[in-house]
Amino acid sequence: MDFLVIQALTGLASASSLFLVASGLSLIFGVTRIVNFAHGSLFMLGAYIAWTLTDALGWADHAGPLGFWGGVLASALMVAALGALIEIVILRRIYHAPPLFPLLATFGLALMIEDLVRLIWGPEDLLGPRAPGLDGAVTILGQKLPSYDLALIALGPLVLGGLWLLLHRTHWGVLVRAATQDRAMVGALGVNQARLFTGVFALGTFLAALGGAVQIPREAVHHALDMQIIVEAFVIVVIGGLGNVAGAFLAAVLVAELNAFGILLFPRIGLVLLFLVMAVVLVLRPHGLLGRPESEPRAAVAPTVDPWRPTGPTGWAVGLALAGGLALLPLVADAYVLSVATEILIFALFAASLHLMMGVGGMVSFGHAAFFGLGAYGAALATLGWGAPMAVGLVTGPLLALAGAAVAGWLCVRLSGVYLAMLTLAFAQIVWSVVFQWQDVTGGDNGLLGMWPDRWASDPAVFFWLTLGLCGGAIALTRHIAFSPMGYALRACRDSVRRAEAIGLDRARAQWVGFVLAGGLAGLAGALFAYLKGSVFPDVLGIPVSVDALVMVLLGGLGSLTGPLVGAVAYKTLAIVVSSWTDHWPLILGALIVGLVIAAPDGLTGLAHRLAAAGRHGRRAGRS
């Protein structure tokens, strides 16, 4: 019993730091509708700056408790100033962009911050100083508990109370709560939205950095903190209810206690317990524990302004000419170039499958890698477990992905927006956990090795042609689906759920079918990827692969069926080329992504369309 009490108190101490991060993320999303992927990076930056001020510069040694807590507060204020600068210089320029494009910008910022942290502080873990006066332990029921944990347990409710007073007893807080409910109405009433957004972003950043700073006496500071914390923060915000600070506090306590007891009580599912709980909460409470249903659900994907047009004879001629040109590549390229080109083709299909779900169906996915990975493992198990030829593996992989998408989609289409996206993330993490721990079948973290193409397709040129044919056919299928009756139904549900249901469309059925088809196409890409690499590891199911797919789709542009193809080619080519030039490729790639988002907030295809339109206008003006 005494051990359980201490473990629970340790969980409460962790909950305070998690609450600080999650409350900041909740406030930012509630007001600005930005899915801030860089929030974890700002948390990490707060920890590094706090370590510099309190340890490297000796504030904690020279001024005692005042120096330590002064360093913690100063680091949070410095990062908050940086957050305000980011909002003014970058995010303010793209508020008019489709709702998910700020996510792409914050992803670029996350890449830049992570590489800058590694460049400034090095790759080694850094141990922070003890808080003066709180470096001992207290005895509770015969067990030792660090004194600093008690301070953190008190910090969480104090911050919650301060935020409640700020949001309910000040004029600025009233505006923030009003903007959370209806920011368009707040703007119509004459409120300066630019200042409000900057203030909210700075406050959210301050809370994130403070959460990182107060953790330095408890755990080492390292450059992987951003990804570690951002996933938990998103889970907490979704479980508690978007934009609800009290819900974030309740969810932070729940998540922290799950982390504290999960491995002890449920060792077999400890890795995925958090996502199982989130999935159950979202199924039972689609808007989180304390969230409230919105009167009109906000579309995560902006409606199409100009209706897409089916591909005409000219479009098909261009597509066939491009495919023919690519088919000649093996005649002039070496094995390495063919391998890179094959990988780009595979990821173009992966991005196109996600675009079918997002751009056509309006369903955002943070866990699309689940179906990519299921396709890869399905092909690997068919080849290595059954001794089946590659043709069987290329069928088994997509079928396994289709089955997984059928199960996940049945649950996910009940939700919308970020809640749907987070449920897909939960499904992906559950599948990853099963693959990681089922060593007898999947090989666990050792993966499955030695699944090369059959002899007839072992030549890089032949495998490239095979991949070109399969990916080209599958991408053409996505275009056919988009202009089929089902595709029009999906687009109707994307643009307006109420109108679609009013004319008799079965929204849930249409979206489920679209979800399953997208999963199956991603599975085909995963199967081809497995044969290309000759091995499969749990990483193919990981969050970074899902993020890569999102980046490719958004970079190319959601408003065009060619967008994901352009985005995949641009992103993968940039990543490969820049990484071959320098070890600091994340910094350069992140800066390029941010620059492209600012220059082309509707994606690369949108930029191309605008340039073409400007050229036509200029030629007409010249003739007149």
Image: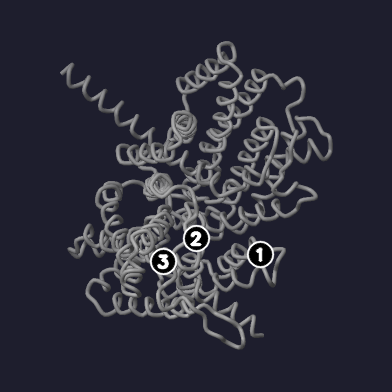
On the question of residue 409 being in view, the answer is: no
Q: Nearer the viewer, residue 449 or 285?
A: 449
- Residue 612 at x, y = what percent? 31, 26
Q: Is residue 233 above or below residue 517?
A: below
The kind of residue on which mark 2 rests is Ala
Q: Which residue is mark 3?
A: 211
Q: Quadrant of the C terminus?
A: top left
Label 2, residues with CA under 10 Å away: few <14, some 14-19, many ≥20: some
Residue 225: give x, y in percent of width and height: 48, 56
From the viewer's perspective, is the residue at label 2 or at label 1 nearer? 2
Sequence-first tag of 3 and 2: 3
Q: Amino acid at mark 1?
A: Gly
Instruction: Tell me whether the residue at label 2 lies in contact with that at label 1, contact meaning CB atoms closer than 8 angstroms.
Output: no
How much space separates mark 3 and mark 2, taking CA atoms? Answer: 14 Å
Give the Cα distance between marks 2 and 1. Answer: 22 Å
Q: Which residue is mark 2?
A: 220
Residue 304: image location, x then y, percent:
39, 43
- Residue in the picture at 69% in, 72% down: 265
Residue identifier under label 1: 270
Residue lying at 49% horizontally and 78% vertically, measured from the top left: 136
Q: Secondary structure at mark 1?
A: loop
Residue 496 seen by the camera: yes
Question: Tag 3 or tag 1, which sits nearer the N-term?
Answer: 3
Q: Quadrant of residue 71?
A: bottom left
Farthest-out residue, front: 62
Residue at the far top: name it. Answer: 331
Q: Is residue 443 left or right of residue 417?
A: right
Residue lying farthest to the bottom in this orientation: 141
Where residue 290 appears, x then y in whole percent? Answer: 47, 74
Mark nearer the N terminus (2 vs 1): 2
Residue drawn at (65%, 20%), measured in percent from left and top?
460
Alpha-carbon distance for marks 1 and 3?
Answer: 24 Å
